[in-house]
Amino acid sequence: MSIKNAFITGLQYVLPHHTLSRWMGKLTHSKNKLLKNLMIGLVSKLYGVDMDEAANPSANDYPNFNAFFTRALKPDVRTWPTAANAIASPADGYVSQIGTITGGEVFQAKGKSFTASALLGDAARAAAFQDGRFATIYLSPRDYHRLHMPVGGTLREMVHIPGRLFSVNAATTCAVPGLFARNERVAAIFDTELGPMALVLVGAIFVCGIETVWHGVVTPPTVSEIRAWHYQANPPTLARGEEMGRFNMGSTLIVLFAKDAMQWQPELKAGQPIKLGSLLGSYHKPTPQKGWLDFLRL
């Protein structure tokens, strides 16, 4: 690690993460036209944001910077796989890591990992993903920041797990042990055709909000204890491709599947760019069981 990266990482241990994120939240929600247009212009130029993809391509179309950051796309700029057994990327970004949960451990970076139970806040919750599959997708400031369903599913549980707000860029990911299980995060557990699926929305410094379509804003507020919501009655059901949540400022999404439930696309590697809707993996659709009436029809 370079001296510069070591200094920046070390500084993060003493920064007041949540206070800084609250200040950033106020700034990004400011309706001062001059300020928000200046911020939109700077970020667009600095990170190469493609505004031709946006449903509203002008800075004047957004009441504040956060509305720009969570902008909608034109309906035809992302394509989705046609195969019924396809698993689609839930976000724009790049593949930070992808692979198998081995011995309960999720690989983070060279020499570093974290447990699925720490990530999900509970060993019983993580048991469904023992020896399963995981993919970690990092969203940069240039990316589309709405998150969509990789497969259809019915929501079983949502968990808000408090924590720090370290940066989730490549340098910090390589330097901070157990980063994604230390940062504040929201985990949504779905029942799907291929078994349980977890979508874990990981916060980061200056990420001033995580929200879902069924709940609205989950964080802030900052809390000291884990909060969980269970959806036994009238649970939300979302189809593949439907929006499920968004980051108010950028961060990381981790997808978990159960053991032997699916396969990642073999060509996907760490560091590879990926677009919302592109093919992430596949699974075997269950064969419908025939009843006695079906045999009478033969």
Image: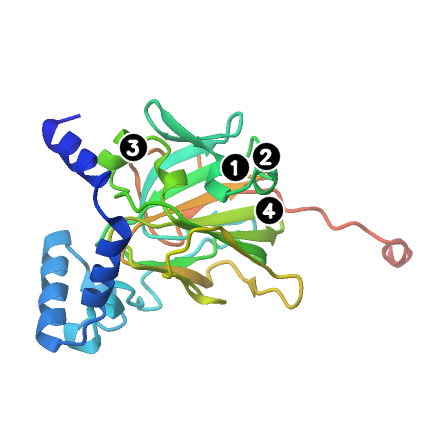
Contact, CB < 8 Å: mark 4 with mark 2? no
Tell me the kind of residue under disc 3: Val
Q: Secondary structure at mark 4?
A: strand
Quarter assignment of residue 219: bottom left
Q: Earlier in the sequence, mark 1 or mark 2?
A: 1
Q: Nearer the viewer, mark 1 or mark 4?
A: 1
Question: Would you call the spot at circle 4 few (<14 residues within 10 Å), some (14-19), or many (20 or more)?
Answer: many
Find residue 169 and report its horizontal and vertical position in percent. Answer: 24, 41
Which of pointers 3 and 2 lies earlier in the amino acid sequence? 3
- Left or right for 51, reference 76: left
- The residue carrying mark 1 is 117
Q: Label 1 amino acid? A: Ser
- Which dot, 3 or 2, sits closer to the camera? 3
Q: Which mark is drawn over residue 196?
A: 4
Q: Is residue 284 left or right of residue 220?
A: right
The residue identified by callout 3 is 176
Mark 3 and mark 2: Cα distance apart in space: 28 Å
Q: Amino acid at mark 2?
A: Lys
